[in-house]
Image (cartoon, grey):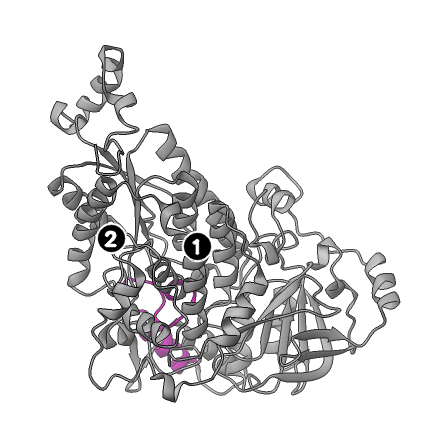
Amino acid sequence: MSATGLDPKHNSRALTEGPHRAAARAQLKGIGYDDEALSKPIIGVASTWIETMPCTYHLRSLSARVKEGIKAAGGTPMEFNTIAISDGITMGTSGMRTSLVSREVIADSIELVAKGHLFDGIVALSGCDKTIPGTVMALARLNLPSVMLYGGSISPGWYNGKEITIMEVFEAIGAHAAGKITDDELNEIEEAASPGFGACGGQFTANTMAMAFEMLGISPMRDSGVPAQYDAKSDTAFRAGELIMDVLRRGQRPRDIITKEALENAIAAVATSGGSTNGVLHLLAVANEAGIDLDIDDFDRISSRTPLTCDLSPGGRYLATHLHEAGGVPVVASRLLEAGLLHEDTQTVTGKTIGELARAAEETDGQQVVRPLSDALKPTGGLAILRGNLAPEGCVVKLAGHERVLHSGPARVFDGEEAAMAAVTSGGIEEGDVIVIRNEGPAGGPGMREMLSVTGALVGAGLGDSVALITDGRFSGATHGFMVGHVAPEAVRGGPIAAVREGDTVTIDVDNRRLDVDLSDDEIERRVAGYVAPDNGESGTGVLAKYAKLVSSASQGAVTR
């Protein structure tokens, strides 16, 4: 028994012990588990390895090291796999509709295997945008002693003597369509941008969520953020295997870690780092699984008091590898502690509080990635929540990387991403326009596609500083510019965004937290009543059709109900 009274084999005894379990033991012995192995705690190693993307391509080797660590610390590992969908590769296609849906499937599959095989603890290995929150949602749901280890960021590519990421490829597509670069230049950027395995290199969604979960406490701080191609990553995997046995002995469970205060620490990390607006969706979803009352207004409250200190791409100069070399997430935690914005007594899987880890941060001399509080990039964080007659349930605007807080202009309305992309790449968008992309919400898409193809093309075409975009869909963490996503309710569920017509004046006013169209309430109601959403092709019995029927609003985290 542990000091907390938790039997280390609290679940697996029912699977492996007693004469009546002989058949189960026989099958397990046939694949190499002997009596000694079956007498130990059984730890599930939930890998999200898949060969469809660089983000998770290396997780098989990390899983092997995790298992070595578990064995060395007195446990018996059992590895299993789940699915993953690449946002970056599916971006701009119908395949992107499956991405957010995969988050739920990842959580469901980990839950089912862990419950079915009565694991005593879990180590989850994540790598891409949806595997990171999906694994943590499952851990919160299961509430078994757990650790989540992030596979780490990719190293940057090099082009014309400068470091680049996949973001530069999306922007190059727009530049190519506008005639600003040649076919050969586009190909050279394509060849250079992704030099191996690991998640996209900026403070895009993967690195945003990885940072958030170190701050939340469910991932081992500093170890989790080691970049994917660094030799030290293998050692962090071994230590994660050892760590889960320590967590099990201490009897610590995810819901001891995932509290309202810990979630506020995670939100502060997203805000101070200029992180992805997807952090709103995913942290709301984790809170839902843990039974914690969190809403989108908490994000605005925390961001409005949190200075933007991290000079990270897409809004800034540096990448995740640079943050690691600067001292990693502990340095970010130390800034929040210094600012009085950290709930320092929250637990972490390391056995230390977040405050203790923040005080132990080892900051590299002369680093410029995380700015001192006296020289913050902005006095407030990288996102804001707006409401108004176009978003009565709220929407999210990203503020890092630009200075605009007000834009009013004529609406250019598109039912779906493809039509908007065609207008951008054909020169059909003008300075001052407000691009409105609807029917890309959780139910309407279905699947709430990211609009990086469109936003990247806008930047590449030279329009990033002169137009705005609103959508009931969402954005990649690599998106920058004056972009508003998660408009709720979405068009297909009677949201006012369905009322907007070509030429209507749309106003985005961050200071007053408003998103409005210049129409009366009666006119909006009349137009919405007459609106017929285009067929999204998902009226059957497949997973997307089921998701469209069950998914909640983006303002609630787009969780299935």
Type of residue at label 2?
A: Gly
CB of mark 1 within 8 Å of CB of mark 2? no
Residue drawn where x is 34% and y is 59% of the image: 345
Magenta residue span: 183-207
Foreground label between 1 and 2:
2
| 375 versus 84 height, above or below | below
Where is residue 304? Give x, y as percent: 53, 75
Where is residue 173? Give x, y as percent: 48, 76
Type of residue at label 1?
A: Lys
Q: Quadrant of the C terminus?
A: top right
Q: Residues within 10 Å of mark 2 (few under 14, many from 20)?
A: some
Q: Secondary structure at mark 1?
A: loop
Would residue 261 appear left or right of 93 to someone viewing this image? left
Q: Nearer the viewer, residue 319 or 414?
A: 319
Q: Identify the image quadrant of residue 57.
A: bottom left
- Residue 192 highlighted magenta (yes or no): yes
| 273 versus 537 height, above or below | below
| 350 versus 8 height, above or below | below
Give the mark nearer the N terminus: 1 vs 2.
Answer: 1
Q: Which residue is mark 2?
A: 351
Using the rendered image of the protein, determine whether residue 262 is visible from the camera's viewpoint. Answer: yes
Q: Which residue is mark 1?
A: 130
Q: Nearer the viewer, residue 55 or 552?
A: 552
Q: CA distance from mark 1 to mark 2?
A: 27 Å
Residue drawn where x is 22% and y is 75% of the image: 325
Where is residue 97? Give x, y as percent: 55, 54
Using the rendered image of the protein, determine whether residue 191 is visible from the camera's viewpoint. Answer: no
Where is residue 287? Give x, y as percent: 49, 51
Q: Secondary structure at mark 2?
A: loop
- Residue 246 highlighted magenta (yes or no): no
Residue drawn where x is 56% and y is 79% of the image: 458
